[in-house]
Structures are given as structure tokens and as C-alpha cells.
Image: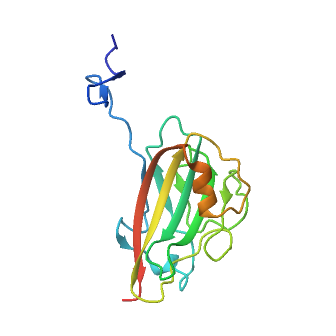
Amino acid sequence: MLSRGCLEASRTSRGRARRAQGAPMPQTLTLTSPAFAHMGRIPDRYAAAGADLSPPLLFAGVPAGAASLALVCDDPDAVSGVFDHFVLYNLSPATPGLPEGLPGVPRHADGSLSGLNGWGRLGYAGPQPPSGIHRYVFTLYALDAVLALPPGVAKKDLLRAAKGHILASATLIGRYGRE
């Protein structure tokens, strides 16, 4: 018998975990930015034609079992296929977010590592679509492991290493383009 406020470990006939009456709802991983709303326009400050700074990001609801976080940003609307704008990994799960203008260095003071963007450089590369309005998809992953990767890996290598370790993910989409 479970005490009030605990999650019942047994499964229902449909295979879903049941929540004991009065138990708190599990937190949901969220990713937001004070600079733009989900599906909102990314300010010029964060674009290649502007200051080309990474936008400030806020994280919440990181699962209790998370050992690290990873963040990627890509443009699925790029003419040549998905273009990677930002790869960052091995962030502490206690990290509340990222400040504006995170430098493109291999290893940050907190121990997190920068990966390669689509230009083959470390750090953030701001939006610069040749025409039209593109979506920029920021995805935060909560992982149950610290990844044994060196600085400077590509997004595909990060996601390969993260496979089987993703506890939760959250997405924030910004839009940018020439109107």
C-alpha cells in the first residue's frame, strides 16, 4: 500500500503509471526566453546581421534524475537542409538557464562544452536566412548521464551519444527573416 503523496509503481491495465491521490504532478521540462515568445520573432540583436549574441534562455522543471543538460538550435527551413546554429552539452542540471551572449569557447567556466555550429565554429551562430522567414528550433534535453565527449562535436554526434539517455526534452521556436 502506498502512502498519500507517493507515485504508485504498479501499472494500470493500459500500461500507464497511476498517480496516487494527492500526489504532486510531475514537473515538465520547459525552455523559454525573456527575449522572445514561443513562435515569436527573434530580435535582430540575436541575428547574424545584428550583434549575433546568443539569446538568454531559462530552464525549469528539470527531472530529478538528470545528470546533465544539452541544448541545440537548428533551422529546419534552411535551403540546404537543417542548419545547426548552437550546440552546448554537459550543462549542470541545476543550471537555471543561459545568459545573453554566451561565448564560443570549448569549455565554459561551469564545465559545459561547446559544440560546432553549421559554420564549423564553436558557439552560437545567429539567424541569417537568405530569404523568407525561417524557424529556429531550440531544444533542451535532460540526460541521465554526463556525456563522455570532447569539446567541439557536431550535433549529430551529440545526439548519437545522448540516445538512450534522454529523460525529457523541451522546445522553444523563434522565427526570423526578411519580411
Coloring basis for residues: rainbow
Q: Is residue 144 left or right of residue 111?
A: left
Residue at 29% in and 26% down: 18
60 vs 14: above or below? below
* Along the viewing direction, whichever of 130 and 177 lies nearer the viewer: 130
Assign the N terminus to one quadrant of the image: top left
Q: In the rendered image of this protein, does residue 10 appear above or below residue 134?
A: above
In the image, taking residue 1 as reference, residue 157 lies left or right, namely: right
User: Where does residue 2 sit, x and y in percent of width and height?
Assistant: 34, 14
Q: Nearer the viewer, residue 60 or 75?
A: 75
- Quadrant (top left/top right/bottom left/bottom right) for the C terminus: bottom left
Residue visible at 64% across and 68% down in the picture: 123
**Horizontal placement of 84 versus 79: left or right?**
right
* Residue 53 horizontal/vertical position (percent): 57, 73
Give the quarter of the image for residue 41: bottom left
Residue sitting farthest toward the top: 1
Residue at image point 50% right, 76% down: 81
* Whether residue 112 is situated above or below residue 100 in the rendered picture: above
Of the pair 80 and 113, the residue shown nearer to us = 80
The total of numbered circles placed on residues is: 0
Residue 118 picture location, percent across and down: 60, 74
Q: Is residue 116 above or below residue 62?
A: below
Q: Position of residue 9 (x, y in %)?
A: 38, 22
Work out whether residue 27 or residue 148 is closer to the camera in this orientation and state it: 148
